[in-house]
Image (cartoon, rainbow, N blue to C red):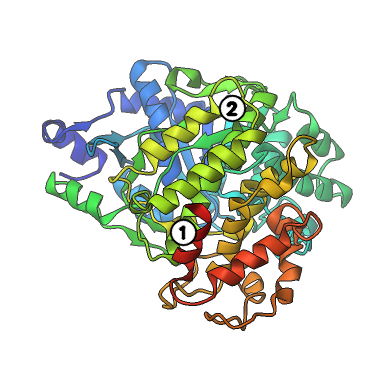
Amino acid sequence: MKLTRAGVSADKNAFVAAGYALPTFHYETVKKNTQERPVWIHFGAGNLFRAFQANVVQNLLNAGHMDTGLIAAEGYDYEIIEKSYRPHDNLTILATLKSDNTVDKTVIGSIMESLSLDSSCEDDLMRLKDIFANPSLQMASFTITEKGYAITDAKGTILPAIESDCNKGPEKPQSYLGKVASLLHHRFSNGAFPIAMVSMDNCSHNGDKLRTAILSFANAWCAKGLAEKSFQAYVENSSKVSFPWTMIDKITPRPDARIEALLEQDGIEDLDAVTTSKNTYIAPFVNAEECEYLVVEDSFPNGRPALEQGGVIFTDRDTVNKVEKMKVCTCLNPLHTTLAIFGCLLGYKSIYEEMENPLLRKLLEIVGYQEGLPVVVNPGILDPKDFISQVLNVRFPNPFMPDTPQRIATDTSQKLAVRFGETIKAYDKSPSLNIGDLKRIPLVLAGWLRYLMAMDDNGNAFSPSPDPLLDTVRSYVAGYQLNNQPKDLEQLNGLLSNEKIFGVDLAAIGMAETVKKYFEELSSGKGAVKATLEKYVQ
């Protein structure tokens, strides 16, 4: 059985007999509709997109609520398209890993086209321009990770690729967002049709991050005479170009060898994963948890598909903000990062195994229920306490979720300001809460400093996960040894005062000394991480 259009058609009965749910819509009709009147293009052709958005659209196509499919575009790692999408005719197998140890298997066929956002690839670029010039296009969505929206480095200096594109104009830009801005300029030049630019990345106020980046190009190009002055007004006009806020939540780990073996036992061929030259690990299948949430600000100036029929929640910006803060600042992301940090230090290779450690489970309960919930505003559409309970009792302990603390630890320096800093700031500003009552959040921050030493609790070296500031932040712990000798903790001051990393100057609010105290204990020798957790969590 081959994962291609012809293969699925030829072996349809075998796929069904093996338990695969297949697309039921008429493919050729949907493909023709999509080519002639595209509605939704998505940038960021990774696992989350294939497991979530593409599955939602397939369900809507099957039910007759949509008659156009998705267009996938990749602007960073073009090998994803060439090595994973096109060899399989844009098909994907979605393995939904359920907490009862069963797997739902679905062939996802809602992606009609896959394109590389590459200025040197003329055919794909021309097709992308045609799509953006089409009045029918209602939305361009994005899952390009939080760092994908960055236009400056940690010091506030504009990134070289961004600066170059700002100076050269919309013709053949090289940066990801420069290319997106160029396509938006092409839409403006061919009728200035309305469109929603929808970030679906897991970061705070994601729509504003995308808007800021796109406006940076528009402002620069217009100021330098490289684009019409009215292009800036077009981007700034929300009745023409909107940048809705969203909250997305679905754990989609990298493709797992156990899932590949399970699918191969069914008779599926050619499922080997590929590691691209940019170190992207991608396969013709994705494995993901069953729980998923997508809450979207209902701001679509050119209309939108009926995604609410597929479980997407549409609401106002204020409610999206409350849901996003609830999840990112308290009910999921901080708990994930906590497990990532201590999981790496304690030698764990899976999230669910960490949940079997009573110390780590108790730490999560305190960070979530006791320290986080007091500053969470209930958004009304999702209950914060129930959300945490589902995370702790259903999602994280799922033994069939092949997620690792090492994956979650990626880019931690970019996450701490939101995942913990917002709670710290809320305590600091509250007239009724005492910031000194925060005891376990500082312990997690100290755990991250201990993690930066790149040595586990047994004294064995490990490789920290990728992080754009890794070399910078590790310099602050350079020279510290895993022993109980007195340590000069003053060299941590510069890092602990960095508001961009922690969201707040920890020294200014009186938390830095607590973090340093915990760090000294965590780094006092082999077994100190476990001992410190036992001391402060039990």
Can residue 143 be seen? no
Q: Position of residue 240 (x, y in %)?
A: 73, 27
Q: Mark 2 or mark 1, which has the lower sequence index?
A: 2
Disc 1 residue type (three-letter): Glu
Q: Position of residue 490 (x, y in %)?
A: 74, 75
Check disc 2 and report its element: helix, strand or loop: strand
For marks 2 and 1, give the one nearer the viewer: 1
Can residue 483 be seen? yes
Which residue is at 45% across, 29% downward?
A: 34
Mark 1 burial class by Cα count in 10 Å: few <14, some 14-19, many 20+ = few
Q: Is residue 233 above or below residue 529?
A: above
Disc 2 residue type (three-letter): Val
40 and 49: which is toward the camera = 49
The residue that mark 2 highlights is: 296
Check disc 1 and report its element: helix, strand or loop: helix
The residue that mark 1 highlights is: 534
Quadrant (top left, top right, bottom left, bottom right) of the N terminus: top left
Q: Position of residue 138 (x, y in %)?
A: 59, 26
Q: Judge from the rendering whether residue 531 lies leftward or rightward of residue 329; answer left or right.
A: left
224 and 527: which is toward the camera = 527
Q: Is residue 269 above or below residue 106?
A: below
- Residue 478, picture quadrant: bottom right
Query: Which numbered dot is residue 517?
Result: none
388 and 115: which is toward the camera = 388
Q: Judge from the rendering whether residue 477 lies leftward or rightward of residue 276; answer left or right.
A: right
